[in-house]
Image: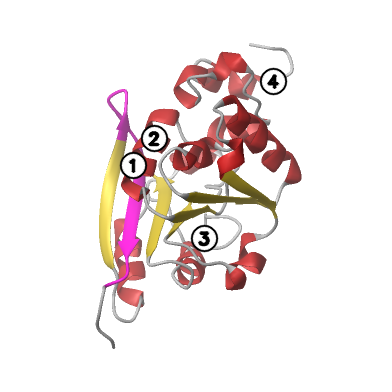
């Protein structure tokens, strides 16, 4: 492992080809990217589930999900408030030859949200670092950053008819149900447990607006 990385990155370094199969072609990440990027095979599957018109990756980070979306969707908008992360994402997308298929935007998703429209909003917000695994039940009301899960959902559902949230494996399923029921009329919810190498890695929640109906 290069000396530039801290000791906390060691286990992620061993998984570098799981994170990016083309890592040796020059993939770049900051330290946060190492433990927050979606493993490529998972991002590939999520993209296949979301394959449609326009997808907005609201917390794109170093671009793992955006790259996969670009291979399967008509239009991808990748947003991150950190200019350096957008730089990494653009660089990594170029390695996969999809950088020209993605609109990279440096900005705050919550500020941009009122002007956005899409078919799918993908939310993989910061989980609070690796310490999320130390609690028995992950609380979306207090542990997600920069805003709680309820705020995320309420903002996203005004943008698209499908909202996808990538969350820790120990997330409170009751809170996911509360989100779907909080909409008027209630949105449908499908929850997938995501396994990688035989271990439960995370949870993906798919929320969909009902085609017709009212409150």
Q: Earlier in the sequence, mark 1 or mark 3?
A: 1
Give the spatial CA distance, label 3 vs label 4.
Answer: 30 Å
* Along the line of sight, the residue nearer the viewer: 161 or 137: 161
Q: Which residue is mark 1?
A: 48
- Mark 1 lies on a secondary structure that is helix
Image quadrant assignment for residue 209:
bottom left
Which-is-in-front pick, marks 3 and 4? 4
Q: Nearer the viewer, residue 89 or 13?
A: 89
Q: Which residue is mark 3?
A: 142
Q: What residue is rendered at 68% in x and 40% in y? A: 85
The residues colored magenta run 195-210
Residue 130 lies, with reference to residue 160, above or below; the image says above
Q: Position of residue 191 (x, y in %)?
A: 27, 52
Residue 62 appears in view: no
Q: 122 left or right of 114?
A: left
Real-space Cα separation, disc 1 to disc 3, in angstroms: 31 Å
Q: Which residue is mark 2?
A: 44
Discs 2, 1 touching: Cβ within 8 Å = yes
Of callouts 2 and 3, the N-terminal one: 2
Q: Earlier in the sequence, mark 1 or mark 4?
A: 4
Q: Secondary structure at mark 2?
A: helix
Q: What residue sits 75% from the left and 45% below the top?
A: 83
Q: Nearer the observer, disc 4 or disc 2?
A: 2
State the residue position of label 4: 5
Tell me, yes or no, whether the highlighted magenta stretch contains residue 184: no
Indicate which label's residue lies in the foreground, 2 or 3: 2
Question: Label 1, label 4: how many angstroms apart (C-alpha)?
Answer: 33 Å
Q: Quadrant of the C terminus?
A: bottom left
């Amino acid at each position: 492992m290069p000396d530039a990385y801290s000791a906390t990155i060691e286990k992620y370094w061993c998984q570098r080809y799981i994170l990016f199969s083309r890592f040796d072609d020059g993939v770049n990440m900051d330290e946060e990217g190492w433990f927050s990027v979606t493993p490529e095979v998972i991002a590939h599957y999520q993209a296949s589930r979301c394959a449609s018109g326009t997808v907005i990756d609201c917390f794109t980070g170093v671009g793992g999900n955006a790259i996969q979306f670009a291979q399967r969707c008509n239009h991808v908008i990748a947003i991150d408030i950190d200019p350096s992360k957008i730089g990494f994402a653009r660089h990594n997308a170029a390695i996969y030859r999809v950088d020209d298929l993605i609109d990279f935007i440096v900005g705050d998703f919550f500020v941009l949200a009122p002007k956005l429209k899409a078919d799918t909003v993908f939310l993989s917000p910061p989980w609070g670092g690796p310490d999320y695994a130390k609690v028995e039940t992950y609380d979306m009301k207090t542990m997600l950053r920069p805003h709680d899960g309820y705020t995320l959902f309420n903002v996203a559902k005004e943008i698209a008819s499908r909202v996808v949230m990538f969350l820790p494996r120990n997330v409170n399923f009751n809170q996911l149900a509360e989100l779907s029921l909080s909409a008027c009329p209630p949105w449908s919810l499908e929850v997938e447990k995501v396994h990688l190498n035989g271990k439960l890695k995370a949870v993906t929640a798919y929320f969909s607006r009902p085609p017709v109906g009212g409150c």
